[in-house]
Image (cartoon, grey):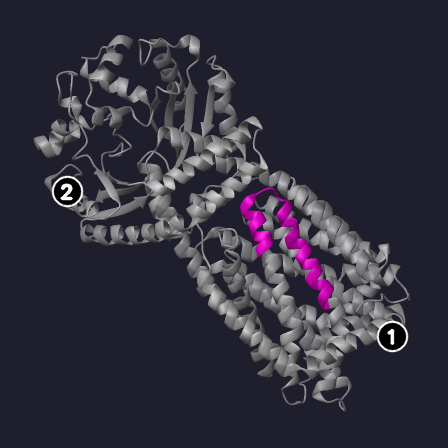
Amino acid sequence: MSNTKKNKGIWLARLVSGYSKAVIACFIVLIALAGWFSKNFRIDASAETLLLKNNKLYIQTQIMDSRFSPQEFILVAYQPKQGPLFSQQTFSDITKLSEQFKQIDRVEAVTSILNVPLISFMDGLEPGLKASDWTWQAKHYSPEQMQDVLSDHPIYTDLLVNQQQSATAIQILFKADPELEKIEHKITELQKKHLTNEFSEQDKAEIEQLSQQADPIKLRLNKVRQQEIDKIYQIADQVEDRASIYLGGGQVLAYQLIKIIKNDLLVFGSAIALVICVLLFALFRQWRWVFLPIICCAGSVVTTVGLFGMLDMRTTVISSNFIALQLILTLAIVIHLIVQFRQLAQKHSDYSQQQLVEETISSKIAPCFYAGLTTSVGFASLIFSHIQPVIAFGWMMIVAMLVSTLVSLLLFPALLNLLPLKPVTAKSEHTSKVMSWLTDMILGHKVLVFFIAAGLLAASAVGALKLDVENSFIHYFSESTKVRKELEFIDQQFGGSTPLDFVYTVKSEQQDTDLVLNAETVQTLQKIQHVMNQYPVIGKEMSIVNFTQLAKKLNHGKPLTEYELTAVYHLLDKELSEQLLGAYFSPEHHQLRISTRIKDSTEGFNRADFLQQLRGDIEGLGIASDSYQLTNLFVLYQDILQRLFDSQVSTLGLVYLALTLVLLAVFRSFKVAIIAIIPNIISTMMILGLMGWFGIPLDLMTITIAAIAMGIAVDDTIHFVHHYLKSVEQQSQDEAVRATYHSVGFAMLFTTIIITTGFGMLGFSDFIPSVMFGLLTGLAMLIALLTDLTLLPAMLNKFVGARKAPTHS
């Protein structure tokens, strides 16, 4: 290192040590301000955080939602623990629950088998039918009559009563917020321009302005929704002694996700902190090496949370583990500083505390800075994934990495400088022996190491080719969780859980202005639903076809002509026609909707193949691809999963390239940069290969593992290479490797033990993506340590001799 750069490093170190109290005071103010802004920190578990806002499928779904106006609802399933479903006890419980649900402020209506029109009891369809005249509440039909009329009902089976007639459901409908509805309608109208390539910067600015107006309304509404769900659970508990209650619906899922995220942030953040304390004391055997890292970790987390609150960067399902990552990132840098300080203290027993701190920072500021930079590059690669929640996670972790680097390189030495000098405990004799044995083994068998590495890379590449994205959202939750049990029950007993809509546009030549529905249109929909019925994964289907089936029953088994259907449509009471047809028929746009739900818990279900086959079967009916659309959450989520493959390839490629360029800038040698990047490529490929071989699918969280693992693991690589290049200037290549093992090697071993154990704590989470994220990232750290302590020194020893050291601060 040149004298100029060395002096610069010493100057920075002296600045921190000379003004320690001022540095600490600045951080106290910063952390206090961050603590104030942390009250604005938000958790967003809405379905929108998992979707791509500006892609065609999302916009089409928004358009159809506004056109057919499906209402926000929560489904409350009631399953008697003993006795038949159709009984006076059931009717009494449903009546009681329904009345209490109606008392919730935002509830507009409560629908159950007791208040829906049971027009099957009528002799035929009559003009001016009123929905309220033909309900259990109006007629008080017997349990036997109710069971008979609801058996294989074209509309209510799998919607309000399951096929086996062992459970029924109460549908709670909520009022829309008029102001929010108006804003979202305007946003949808502007987004429609994306479909015709007419979207402008002015439109973008207007959408941002509208979104800002909508945001406080959404925040308020989300709080209200959580209170409503708490209240619904509280009301439902009144019948828990005689019935099992299961809640379903998008808002219930968001509610449960927020509970899990909050729990993981608190419980696993605390558990990881506790594990860090225990391991730090076990490794260093002095309390100062416990308290100082914990203070730095806590300062990093509080500062980061405050910045997220100030910048309105909200954590989602994807970024819910940021606290665990924040702790690890800070600790990785601090441990390298601790190990360096202790080694200097053993070597220079005559140095003062301030001298040791200055020497530690001046010698480590360069590798620590560049390690932070490379980690940031790993996170930055996520920004180019083209998947919105992953992009947001990338930005969040760049902010977190910046905070961790500043806290570690400024606050830690400032605090350390104020402590009295104490004798340093000796290194573990067993650890030293392991390092010595490993050094001898690697130096004596370099060619074998190269062959093993090549074999592992080849096997990993084959495994990576087996990766897929087939996963079920239901399987994201542990089997013991309430949300998993509720999702599975609704999915299996009430016609599926993930909505998929088929919207058919009637061509102008098929239309007859005198008819609301013509025979050809109805027959086309019947054919489509017949095709859908052949797929076991498709649950409940609803469209005007269900209405025609019901009408056929009332017409003594004879189908209604198109003129009779039109007459009935006009003669029916408005409330009844809206209940039966409103969400499935848009005369104004000449569109008809088939609403279906997919049974997401179906074993062996290949979603990509299903969509491709369904499209093929529909088009096989002679229906042109431009006359129908598949929309809603199932299509949107599947679209994101399919993008994960391309995103994984482009993200990893970008990480490899960017890190190679950074390493080139750090070491000013193309050969050294390539040597440094190879172990990290092998590490990430091994993780992807293991996922492929063991059938672990990519999802919105596991896609981030490779980039994150490489970004963190390359830190150790930089420290190892940096120390080796300094050592090889004064001694032989073999001795330089030995010196590096017994210096940086200890820090690498300690950081990996703590990181792996910390991430391993996530294995106890109830959220399976968090479990896989923790276990796979921990495994990636172990593999990275293995390659950095075997392949990296072997390549350095073989190909890199004495050279001019890189000139970095």
Q: Mark 2 — residue? A: 95
Please state which amino acid type lies under the numbered disc 1. Answer: Asn
Please state which amino acid type lies under the numbered disc 2. Answer: Thr
Number of residues whose C-alpha sits closer than 10 Å to that of mark 2, classed few (under 14), some (14–19) or many (20 or more): some
Q: Position of residue 362 (x, y in %)?
A: 76, 76
Q: Position of residue 373 (x, y in %)?
A: 70, 60
Q: Is 605 above or below relative to 336? A: above
Number of residues whose C-alpha sits closer than 10 Å to that of mark 1, classed few (under 14), some (14–19) or many (20 or more): few
Q: Mark 1 — residue? A: 3
Range of magenta residues:
368-396
Give the residue drawn at x 19%, y 34%: 113
Give the residue drawn at x 23%, y 43%: 78
Question: Foreground residue, 720 or 337?
Answer: 337
Regarding residue 757, the answer to whether it shows in the image is no
Q: Position of residue 399 (x, y in %)?
A: 60, 59
State left or right for residue 524 relative to residue 395: left
State left or right for residue 322 relative to residue 750: left
Give the residue drawn at x 50%, y 30%: 192
Image quadrant in which the C terminus is located: bottom right
Q: Position of residue 275 (x, y in %)?
A: 53, 71
Image quadrant in which the N terminus is located: bottom right
Q: CA distance from mark 1 to mark 2?
A: 85 Å
State left or right for residue 7 relative to residue 587: right
Circle count: 2
